[in-house]
Image (tube, rainbow, N blue to C red):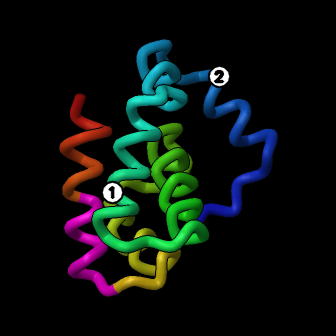
Amino acid sequence: MSKATLQQLKEAYQKLPQDIKRVYSSDEVTAKIYDLGKKYGLHIDQLGELVDEIGLVMIGISDPKKFPAEISTRLRINTTTAQLIVGEINDDVFLP
Protein backbone atom coordinates (compact mmCIF):
# COMPACT_ATOMS: atom_id res chain seq x y z
CA MET A 1 0.00 0.00 0.00
CA SER A 2 1.28 3.43 -0.92
CA LYS A 3 2.12 5.93 1.78
CA ALA A 4 1.74 8.96 -0.46
CA THR A 5 1.15 12.31 1.13
CA LEU A 6 -1.88 14.42 0.33
CA GLN A 7 0.39 16.80 -1.57
CA GLN A 8 1.81 13.96 -3.68
CA LEU A 9 -1.71 12.77 -4.46
CA LYS A 10 -2.78 16.27 -5.52
CA GLU A 11 0.28 16.70 -7.72
CA ALA A 12 -0.21 13.30 -9.36
CA TYR A 13 -3.87 14.07 -10.02
CA GLN A 14 -3.06 17.44 -11.58
CA LYS A 15 -0.69 15.76 -14.04
CA LEU A 16 -3.34 13.38 -15.34
CA PRO A 17 -4.77 13.81 -18.82
CA GLN A 18 -8.27 15.27 -18.83
CA ASP A 19 -9.92 12.03 -19.96
CA ILE A 20 -8.41 10.13 -17.01
CA LYS A 21 -9.59 12.84 -14.62
CA ARG A 22 -13.08 12.48 -16.06
CA VAL A 23 -13.05 8.70 -15.53
CA TYR A 24 -11.54 9.11 -12.05
CA SER A 25 -14.56 11.06 -10.87
CA SER A 26 -17.33 9.63 -13.05
CA ASP A 27 -20.58 8.40 -11.60
CA GLU A 28 -20.54 5.51 -14.06
CA VAL A 29 -17.23 4.20 -12.71
CA THR A 30 -18.44 4.66 -9.15
CA ALA A 31 -21.54 2.60 -9.97
CA LYS A 32 -19.42 -0.15 -11.57
CA ILE A 33 -17.21 -0.36 -8.50
CA TYR A 34 -20.24 -0.42 -6.21
CA ASP A 35 -21.77 -3.23 -8.30
CA LEU A 36 -18.51 -5.18 -8.05
CA GLY A 37 -18.63 -4.77 -4.29
CA LYS A 38 -22.15 -6.18 -4.20
CA LYS A 39 -21.24 -9.03 -6.54
CA TYR A 40 -18.33 -10.13 -4.38
CA GLY A 41 -20.03 -9.46 -1.05
CA LEU A 42 -17.63 -6.73 0.03
CA HIS A 43 -18.33 -4.82 3.22
CA ILE A 44 -18.36 -1.02 3.16
CA ASP A 45 -14.82 -0.80 4.57
CA GLN A 46 -13.56 -3.20 1.91
CA LEU A 47 -15.31 -1.18 -0.77
CA GLY A 48 -13.56 1.94 0.50
CA GLU A 49 -10.19 0.18 0.30
CA LEU A 50 -11.00 -0.97 -3.24
CA VAL A 51 -11.89 2.57 -4.32
CA ASP A 52 -8.71 3.93 -2.73
CA GLU A 53 -6.47 1.39 -4.45
CA ILE A 54 -8.15 1.89 -7.83
CA GLY A 55 -7.57 5.63 -7.46
CA LEU A 56 -3.92 5.14 -6.55
CA VAL A 57 -3.38 3.00 -9.64
CA MET A 58 -5.23 5.48 -11.85
CA ILE A 59 -3.12 8.43 -10.77
CA GLY A 60 0.12 6.47 -10.98
CA ILE A 61 0.99 6.21 -7.28
CA SER A 62 0.52 2.44 -6.98
CA ASP A 63 2.22 -0.04 -9.30
CA PRO A 64 -0.38 -1.72 -11.54
CA LYS A 65 1.67 -4.93 -11.44
CA LYS A 66 1.08 -5.11 -7.68
CA PHE A 67 -2.62 -4.29 -7.98
CA PRO A 68 -3.92 -7.85 -7.39
CA ALA A 69 -1.70 -8.35 -4.34
CA GLU A 70 -2.67 -4.94 -2.94
CA ILE A 71 -6.36 -5.73 -3.43
CA SER A 72 -5.94 -9.08 -1.68
CA THR A 73 -4.10 -7.48 1.23
CA ARG A 74 -6.19 -4.34 1.62
CA LEU A 75 -9.55 -6.10 1.27
CA ARG A 76 -8.41 -9.13 3.30
CA ILE A 77 -9.59 -11.53 0.60
CA ASN A 78 -7.99 -14.55 -1.04
CA THR A 79 -5.86 -14.11 -4.13
CA THR A 80 -8.33 -15.90 -6.38
CA THR A 81 -11.13 -13.48 -5.53
CA ALA A 82 -8.71 -10.56 -5.82
CA GLN A 83 -7.73 -11.72 -9.32
CA LEU A 84 -11.40 -11.94 -10.34
CA ILE A 85 -12.08 -8.43 -9.04
CA VAL A 86 -8.98 -7.03 -10.73
CA GLY A 87 -9.97 -8.68 -14.00
CA GLU A 88 -13.35 -6.99 -13.90
CA ILE A 89 -11.83 -3.65 -12.93
CA ASN A 90 -9.41 -3.94 -15.84
CA ASP A 91 -12.25 -4.72 -18.25
CA ASP A 92 -14.85 -2.29 -16.91
CA VAL A 93 -12.80 0.63 -15.58
CA PHE A 94 -9.24 0.76 -16.90
CA LEU A 95 -9.67 -0.44 -20.51
CA PRO A 96 -12.54 1.84 -21.55
The quadrant in which the C terminus is found is top left
According to the picture, the residue beneath numbered tag 1 turns out to be 36
Q: Residue 11: percent from the left, percent from the top?
A: 70, 30
The quadrant in which the N terminus is found is bottom right
Residue at screen point 54% across, 29% down: 25
Amino acid at dot 2:
Gln
Crowd class of label 2 (few under 14; some 14 to 19; many from 20; radius 10 Å): few
Q: Is residue 92 above or below residue 44?
A: above
Q: Quadrant of residue 92?
A: top left
Q: Residue 18: percent from the left, percent from the top?
A: 49, 13
Residue at screen point 36% across, 54% down: 64
Q: Residue 58: percent from the left, percent from the top?
A: 46, 40
Q: Is residue 1 above or below residue 27?
A: below
Residue at screen point 78% across, 51% down: 5
Amino acid at dot 1:
Leu
In-image side of 16 versus 39 (left or right): right
The mark tally for this picture is 2
